[in-house]
């Protein structure tokens, strides 16, 4: 089973320079059935799941084209919608902060000969972090077919522009 990452990424080396590559990608995007599910500006593009298929956990694909050597490098990153990602990171930070403060407070209490009730923060924080990671993995599993669909869109758009075989899907 492949290792789960919170925000899977991939990269594709391309022959054209970054601005030219984005121009070609925009031209190829015209007339596709997913043109309405894409936003593009400068060297960045965002691909979304079709409105009728979109769920709470549906991913979006953020793509950037940057200079590299004699050509360019397309970098793609999958993630949840920005509002969900912000909530997820807030919860991750809050639970991590609770565990860290609980560990420090519990250690000081223990060293002072007091009852280390602060360790309850660790007892709540560590399972909380594991729970958030499990939620992330579940969301990825539920949206795996949508991530494949978004990746296939990019694969179709960059076909013939690649310098070498694409990096494996992660």
Image (tube, rainbow, N blue to C red):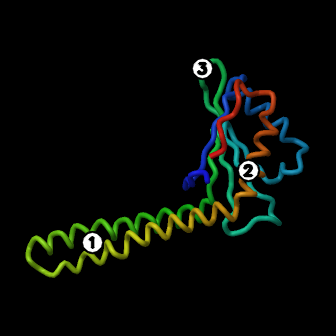
Instruction: State the residue position of label 2.
Output: 47
**Residue nearest the observer in this picture, 75 or 66:** 75
Q: Nearer the viewer, mark 3 or mark 1?
A: 1
The residue furthest top is 70
The residue furthest right is 31
**Residue nearest the observer in this picture, 63 or 19:** 63
- Label drawn at residue 112: none
Q: Residue at x 91, y 44 (%)?
A: 31
Counting residues from the start of the chain, the first of labels 2 and 3 encountered is 2
**Distance from Cα at disc 2 to Cα at disc 3:** 26 Å
**In the figure, is residue 94 to the left or right of 70?**
left
**Distance from Cα at disc 3 to Cα at disc 1:** 49 Å
Instruction: State the residue position of label 1.
Output: 102
**2 lies above or below 154:** below
Counting residues from the start of the chain, the first of labels 3 and 1 encountered is 3
Instruction: State the residue position of label 3.
Output: 69
Q: Residue at x 73, y 50 (%)?
A: 47
Mark 2 residue element: strand
The residue furthest front is 1
Q: Residue at x 69, y 65 (%)?
A: 142
How busy is the neighbourhood of tag 1: few (under 14 within 10 Å), some, or many (20 plus)? many
**Distance from Cα at disc 1 to Cα at disc 2:** 41 Å
**100 lies above or below 11:** below
């Amino acid at each position: 089973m492949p290792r789960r990452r919170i925000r899977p990424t991939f990269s594709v080396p391309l022959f054209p320079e970054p601005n030219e590559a984005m121009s070609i990608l925009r031209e190829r995007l015209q007339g596709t059935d997913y043109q309405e599910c894409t936003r593009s500006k400068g060297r960045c593009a965002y691909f979304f799941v079709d409105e009728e298929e979109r769920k709470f956990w549906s991913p979006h694909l953020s793509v950037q084209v940057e200079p590299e050597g004699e050509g360019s490098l397309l970098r793609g990153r999958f993630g949840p919608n920005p509002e969900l990602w912000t909530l997820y990171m807030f919860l991750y930070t809050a639970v991590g902060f609770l565990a860290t403060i609980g560990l420090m407070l519990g250690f000081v209490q223990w060293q002072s000969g007091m009852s280390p009730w602060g360790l309850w923060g660790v007892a709540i924080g560590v399972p909380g972090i594991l729970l958030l990671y499990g939620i992330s993995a579940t969301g990825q599993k539920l949206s795996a077919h949508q991530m494949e669909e978004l990746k296939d869109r990019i694969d179709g758009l960059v076909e013939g522009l690649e310098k070498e075989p694409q990096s494996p899907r992660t």
